Amino acid sequence: MGSIAPSPAEIDASVVKITRSTNLRDVPLPGSPEELSHSYCTDHMVTVRWTAGNGWETPEVRPFENLSVPPTASCLHYATECFEGMKVYRGYDGKLRLFRPDCNGERLVSSAQRTSLPAFKFEELKVLIAKLMQIDGPRWLPKDQPGRFLYLRPAMIGNGPHLGVQTPKEALLFIIAVPWPDPSKKKPEQAGGQHGLKLLASHPDSIRAWPGGFGYAKLGANYGPSLVAHGKAQAIGFDQVLWLFGEDRQVTEAGASNFFVVWENKQSGKLELVTAPLENQLILPGVTRRSVLELARTRLNQSCGKLAPVEVVERDFTIGDVHEAWKEGRIVEAFVCGTAYFVTPVKLIRNDDVDMNMLDAGAERAGYAAQIKSWLEAIMFGKDGAEAHEWGYVIEGESQK
Amino acid sequence: MGSIAPSPAEIDASVVKITRSTNLRDVPLPGSPEELSHSYCTDHMVTVRWTAGNGWETPEVRPFENLSVPPTASCLHYATECFEGMKVYRGYDGKLRLFRPDCNGERLVSSAQRTSLPAFKFEELKVLIAKLMQIDGPRWLPKDQPGRFLYLRPAMIGNGPHLGVQTPKEALLFIIAVPWPDPSKKKPEQAGGQHGLKLLASHPDSIRAWPGGFGYAKLGANYGPSLVAHGKAQAIGFDQVLWLFGEDRQVTEAGASNFFVVWENKQSGKLELVTAPLENQLILPGVTRRSVLELARTRLNQSCGKLAPVEVVERDFTIGDVHEAWKEGRIVEAFVCGTAYFVTPVKLIRNDDVDMNMLDAGAERAGYAAQIKSWLEAIMFGKDGAEAHEWGYVIEGESQK
C-alpha cells in the first residue's frame, strides 16, 4: 500500500498561539518623535512560518522583537519579499475596523507568487490582524479617541538559509502595527499638507516598471531602485516622483500612490476622472484606487452637491495630455491616493522645465477628491451612516486587559 | 568660531576588530550534504555598520551568527540590498588568492548607489576579505589541498528601523564565506556537468531588465522576480533561463551568468566571439565576462593551438541570429560565464519550440571556452606560470592557529 503525502498545511488563523508581552511599551503621543520616526511598533506582532515540506505552521501573536535572519537568507540577497500597506481605524462608534482587508490579502498572495513565495488563503490575513488588534487595539487605539489609526504592515520574506539562487524553501509572514502621523493633520509646509503635493515627473533615464516586469506587484524590488529618483526629487523640494513610461511618456503612478486627474475632455467637453489602467501591469492595483473608482462610478454619475457629474475612465494618458489640458485651462483638479497618503490633492507637477499648477485653474469646479475622501472616511471610521458598510471589517472581541 | 562637522567616516579595513569564535564548526567534505546545501558558512564573518550621521564604523571580524534585523528594516520591505559573488582560491603554490577583487569592490559600490545605499572606498573590500580569510583560510582551505575554493558573498543591506519609503539611514556591509560545490566536478547529469547547460529562452511575457531600470546592478531586485521563470525552466529540465529583450528578442544574459557564442559571421565568414554589450545597461557587467573578453582579445587574435583566430565583438544580437547561424551550421560553440558557473559550455538552447544543439555542430572547431577557462584557472590557482599575474590578489599573513 502506498502512503499519500499530506498536503502542505494552510494558514489557520483560528488556532493562533498567543504569547503576551510582559514588558509593555509606552504609547507615543500623536506628533511625537517616536510617531514621526515610522519605526516604533506596538507591543506584539504576528508571525507565521512556512516551509516547502510542511507548509504553514501555527500562527503566533507574540511580543514584538527583532527577527533572527541567517546572513545567507534569500530576502537579504534576492529580494524575495513583498508587503501590504493597511490601516486599522478606531471608529466614532468605538469599534475597530479594517478597510477591505480581503483586497489586501488577495494582493499579498499575488505579490508573493510573483516573487516565488508561497500562497495562502487570503481571507486569513484579516483574521490574523484581528487577533493582533484584539490585544494591542485597546491600549494603542483607545476607544475614547475616535478618528485615530495605526498603520499595519503585513509582509512576507524568504528567510531560509539557502544561498543558491532558487525558489525559497522557507518563508515568514509577519504583521506589525506602527503608530503613523495622520496626513490630514500635517502643517501646510509638510508633504501632503493642505496645500497639496508637489510631483516631479520622472526623467526618461529612470523608469519604475516595464511590461513583463512586476510593477503591478507590491514587491520590495519596486521600491529600493526607485529611492534614488525619490531622494533627488525630495532634495529639490518635491514630495514624490510622478512615474512616466514609454516614448510617449504615459503617466503611470506617483511615488507610492495612484494618480488621478479630473479634467474636461478635449473632444467632448465633458468632465472626466481619469487614471492609468491596470491591463499593462505597470501600476499597482491600489485598494484605495479601486475604491475611489467604485465610489466615483456609483455616486458621481449625477450631480452631487456643487459637483457636476463626471465620467470615470481608466485609460492610458500622457504627460503631454496633462500639459495640454493645463495650458487650455481644462484641468479641474489632480490627486493621489493610497493607504499611506490616503486621498491627497496635487498642488504642482513639474515636467522638464514646466511647472503646472494644479490647484488654481479649476478651483471653482474642484472638490471631487475631498468628496471621495469624506465618503471613504465615513466607511473607515464608522460614521455618517456608514457604520455597516460592507467595505468596513469590524474587529470584535477586543481584550479587556 | 563655527565648528566644522566631521565628514562621515570611510571604511578602514586596517583597523578591523577581531573576535575569534570559541566554537569552531566542522569543515564539510567536498560533495557532502552540508556543502550541497549552499547554507553552511565558515566560522567567522565580516560586518561593517554604517549610519547616515557617522558614516562607516570600525569593521569587525566576528563569529558567524544570524543577523538581528528590525521587522521594519528597509531591506525586508524595499529591497535596499545588493551583493557580490566572489571566490577565494587555494593555489597550487600554497597561497590564497582572490581574482580581480577590485572589480567586485567597484561594482558593489555601483550597485549600492543604484539602490540608495552608501558608497565606500572599494579597495577596502579585498582587505576586509583578506582579514576574514587570514583566520578562516587555514582550516577551511587547507594548504595541502590546492585547487579548492570557497564562495564569498559580500552584501550590503539597509537595516535601520525606519519603515517610511526613503533613502536608508542605516546600513550593514557583511561578508560571509561558504563551501560551494565545484562545478567542474559535477556529474554529467547535473546542471553544468560535462555535457553542458540547457538554456530556455525567455517568453516575451517575462522580462528581466529594461533601459532605465537596474539590470546592470547586482541588486536583489533583479533576482527575486526572476525566480518564477527560473523555477519553471528547471521543472522541465533546463538549467537556466536565457533572457531575451525587446521586440527583436535580443539575447542579453543567461540566468545569473553572461552568455557568449562563437560563430562564423554570416557576411564575412570570419569567426567571431560575440556577447551582449554593456551600453544599454540591460546586463550585468560580469568580472568573468570582462576577463574572458580581455583574454580573448589578447591571446586569441592569432592561432592558438588548434584554435583559429577569432574577432571579439560586444554587440546586440538576437535569438533569431542564433537560430539562423545554427540552421546554417555556423555555430562553433556557446558558453556562459560568471563566478558561480565559472566558464561552462551550453549544450542546448530551446526557443519557442525549437531545440538548438550547440555542442555538435561546430565540435571540430570548438575549444575556445575550454582554453579561456584554463587560462583563468591558472591565474586563480597560481599555476602554469601565472603565479604572479596581476589579476591574482594574494592573501598574505594566514593565521598559524
Image: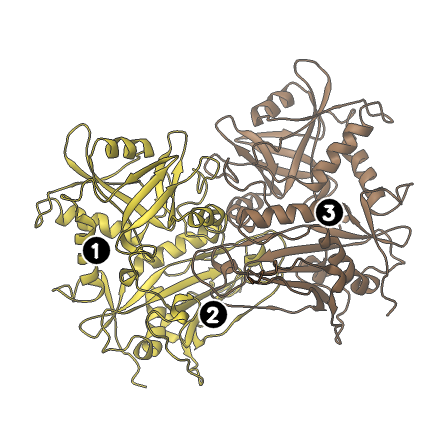
Chain colours: A brown, B yellow
In the picture provided, is A284 more to the left or to the right than B198?
A: right
Q: Amino acid at mark 3?
A: Asp
Q: Residue B361, located in which quarter of the rendered image?
A: top left
Q: Quadrant of the C terminus of chain A?
A: bottom right
Question: Residue A155, percent across and down?
Answer: 63, 56
Q: Nearer the viewer, mark 2 or mark 3?
A: 3
Q: Quadrant of the N terminus of chain A?
A: bottom right
**Cα–Cα gap, marks 3 and 1:** 54 Å
Q: Amino acid at mark 1?
A: Lys
Q: Which residue is mark 1?
A: B373
Q: Residues within 10 Å of mark 1 (few under 14, many from 20)?
A: some
In this rendering, the answer to whether B302 lies above or below B95 is: above
Q: Secondary structure at mark 1?
A: helix
In this rendering, the answer to whether A126 lies above or below A208 is: below
Q: Earlier in the sequence, mark 1 or mark 2?
A: 2
In the picture provided, is A223 more to the left or to the right than B303?
A: right
Q: Which residue is mark 2?
A: B57
The label shown at residue A102 is 3
Q: Residue at x 18, y 71 (%)?
A: B92
Question: Residue A112, percent across and down?
Answer: 59, 50
Q: Chain of mark 3?
A: A
Question: Residue B80, percent across and down?
Answer: 51, 55
In this rendered view, identify the residue nearer to me: A282 or A165.
A165
Same chain under badges 1 and 2? The reply is yes
